[in-house]
């Protein structure tokens, strides 16, 4: 039985992507990442192991839930940017609104201490 790769539609599929279940050819399977190229392109750019759920608005990287911090529903930044948010906002005043979310979050955190 010949199954055609679901990415190129030409070569014979030999691997099934464990993430999306696509059958793909050798060329469209990333051995290193262990997933097909479609999933690889959607991978979190920080850990490279999980599918991304969002894009960090500060650095533009694809981020997964674990590698990011949710400042506000729908606003998610990567942990790296989160740790230097003050610095980034100082450089880009238009991002000031992010600090407001952060402050609200911190009240949360501080009250737990
Ligand atoms: Zn292919
Ligand atoms: Zn896949
Ligand atoms: Zn990640
Ligand atoms: Zn970032």
Image (tube, grey):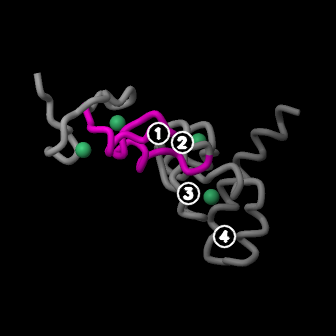
Point out which mark residue 64 bears.
2
Tag 1, which secondary structure?
loop
Residue 57 x, y percent position in the rendering: 54, 62
Q: Earlier in the sequence, mark 4 or mark 1?
A: 1
Residue depicted at 26% across the width and 32% down the height: 22
Point out which mark residue 56 bears.
3
Alpha carbon separation for disc pair 4 and 1: 29 Å
| Above/below status of 53 relative to 23 | below
Residue 80 x, y percent position in the rendering: 71, 54
| Residue sitting nearer the eye, 67 or 72 | 67
Tag 3, which secondary structure?
loop
Read off the residue under disc 1: 51
Q: Which residues are magenta?
A: 23-46
**Local crowd size for mark 3, using a 10 Å CA cut-off: few (<14), some (14–19), many (≥20):** many
Read off the residue under disc 4: 96
| Residue sitting nearer the eye, 29 or 38 | 29
**Local crowd size for mark 2, using a 10 Å CA cut-off: few (<14), some (14–19), many (≥20):** many
Residue 52 x, y percent position in the rendering: 48, 44
Q: Earlier in the sequence, mark 4 or mark 2?
A: 2
As drawn, is 12 to the left or to the right of 91?
left
Does 41 lie within the magenta span? Answer: yes
Q: Earlier in the sequence, mark 4 or mark 3?
A: 3
Question: Decide: marks 4, 2 in contact (CB < 8 A)?
Answer: no
Question: Decide: marks 2, 3 in contact (CB < 8 A)?
Answer: no
Mark closer to the observer (4, 2): 2
Q: Is mark 2 within 8 Å of ligand 3?
A: yes
Question: Decide: marks 4, 1 in contact (CB < 8 A)?
Answer: no
| Residue sitting nearer the eye, 109 or 45 | 45
Mark closer to the observer (3, 1): 1
Residue 34 x, y percent position in the rendering: 46, 33
């Amino acid at each position: 039985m010949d199954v055609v790769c679901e990415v190129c539609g030409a070569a014979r599929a030999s691997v099934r992507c464990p993430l999306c279940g696509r059958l793909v050819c050798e060329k469209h399977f990333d051995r290193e990442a262990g997933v097909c190229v479609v999933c690889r392109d959607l991978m979190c750019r920080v850990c490279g192991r999980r599918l991304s759920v969002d894009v960090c608005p500060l650095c533009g990287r694809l981020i997964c839930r674990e590698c990011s911090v949710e400042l506000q529903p729908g606003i998610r930044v990567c942990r790296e940017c989160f740790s230097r948010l003050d610095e980034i906002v100082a450089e880009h005043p238009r991002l000031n609104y992010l600090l407001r979310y952060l402050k609200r979050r911190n009240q949360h955190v501080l009250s737990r201490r």
